[in-house]
Amino acid sequence: MFRLLSLLLLLSASCLASAADYPEPLQGDFSIKDFQFTSGERLPELKLHYRTLGTPERDAKGVVRNAVLIMHGTGGSGAQFIRPEFAGELFGAGGVLDAKRYYIILPDGIGHGLSSKPSDGLHARFPRYGYQDMIHADYRLLTEALGVTHLRLVMGTSMGGMHTWLWGERYPDFMDALMPLASLPTQISGRNRVWRRTIIDAIRKDPEWLGGDYTTQPQSLGVATELLFFMGSNPQLRQQQMPSLLESDKAIDDAVAKGMHSGDANDSLYQVEASRDYDPAPGLEKITVPLLAVNSADDLINPPELGILEREIKRVKKGRAVLLPLSPETRGHGTHTIAAIWKNYLSELLAATAR
């Protein structure tokens, strides 16, 4: 019994060590003066917050060759990747994205995290940003603040996955490889647009929203939280987590209470509306570097039965698509952050594009 206990303690300590076997991220802010959005609106100063792990390595010409850009999903931030399921699987010693080998950059997109956003004070007078604005701001963060003019890899989850497709089209020579996770290379439409419109309409038509100048969070923020909760996982997992009416009600009530406490209606509204300018489909042939798209079969936001990814990936010169089957490890749309499930594909992509 003592030997068994000792072994269990040793294994537990080993798991904890591997989960924390990456450096503490360094954080910083980059300010862009007089930032102009595609809408024509301007912000006197746009702040972008970011985190980095590792050290940039430059070649003989001074070009950084080991930088990796990882972009988060709607409502998230770069901080969401600093967790055992992601950083613990990828950034540690010997990991696919070992922070001793790679310079990892985790920005907070416009309107998210600690970057400039409506809740900072402008409320609904904040410029209406879109995905094109977000990737342009990240480009300036890389080139002007971090001195990065080339990326070893661009990858992202959900919204960040959509940004990855746009990066490949807008800056085709900027990276060696692309890996979008949990996304489709097509305009937001169908059910994907409907649930977003439901959030947008719930907030904008809520009398408590007061044109964005509320002093307490409007109840429509709870509606937004409920829809995001609904879309984010798969039925099997939800049934396991909530096998009774009482447990189901408690789970959604807890999620709404948390969202009402930590979220902001204007921020959520802008975050969901930002997808309006997303449409990589017309320019897929512009992507010239290897691209590996990974989706999961139980993703309610990007359901495989639509056949969109399988159809459109054929237009990407060096494109490949992987569909992860439903398993006890998948988490619906949230599978994008469970790196253990797909990191072998990332390893293959890096090996295939090594210089």
Image: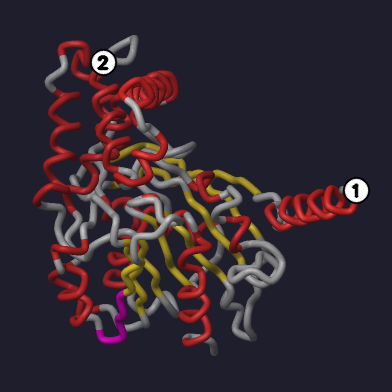
Residues at circles 2 and 1 in contact by the CB criterion of under 8 Å: no
Residue 286 drawn at (x, y percent): 23, 79
Q: Residue furthest right?
A: 2
Q: Dot 1, how many residues are within 10 Å of its Cα: few (below 14), some (14-19), or many (20+)? A: few
Q: Which residue occupies the foreground of this view, 89 or 11? A: 11
Question: Is residue 337 in view?
Answer: yes
- Kindly identify the residue that appears in the image at 29 percent across and 44 percent down: 235
Which residue, given by chain and number where applicable, does mark 1 sit on?
A: 2
Vertical placement of residue 238 versus 8, above or below: above
Mark positioned earlier in the residue sequence (2 or 1): 1
Identify residue type, mark 1.
Answer: Phe
In the rendered view, does 199 fall on the left or right side of 189? right
Q: How is the image coloured?
A: secondary structure
Region of the chain picked out in magenta, as a range: 317-321
- Kindly identify the residue that appears in the image at 26 percent across and 15 percent down: 219
- Kindly identify the residue that appears in the image at 38 percent across and 53 percent down: 137
Vertical placement of residue 294 versus 197, above or below: below
Which residue, given by chain and number where applicable, does mark 2 sit on?
A: 219
Residue 329 drawn at (x, y percent): 45, 56
Q: Which residue occupies the foreground of this view, 166 or 348? A: 348
Residue 214 is inside the magenta segment: no
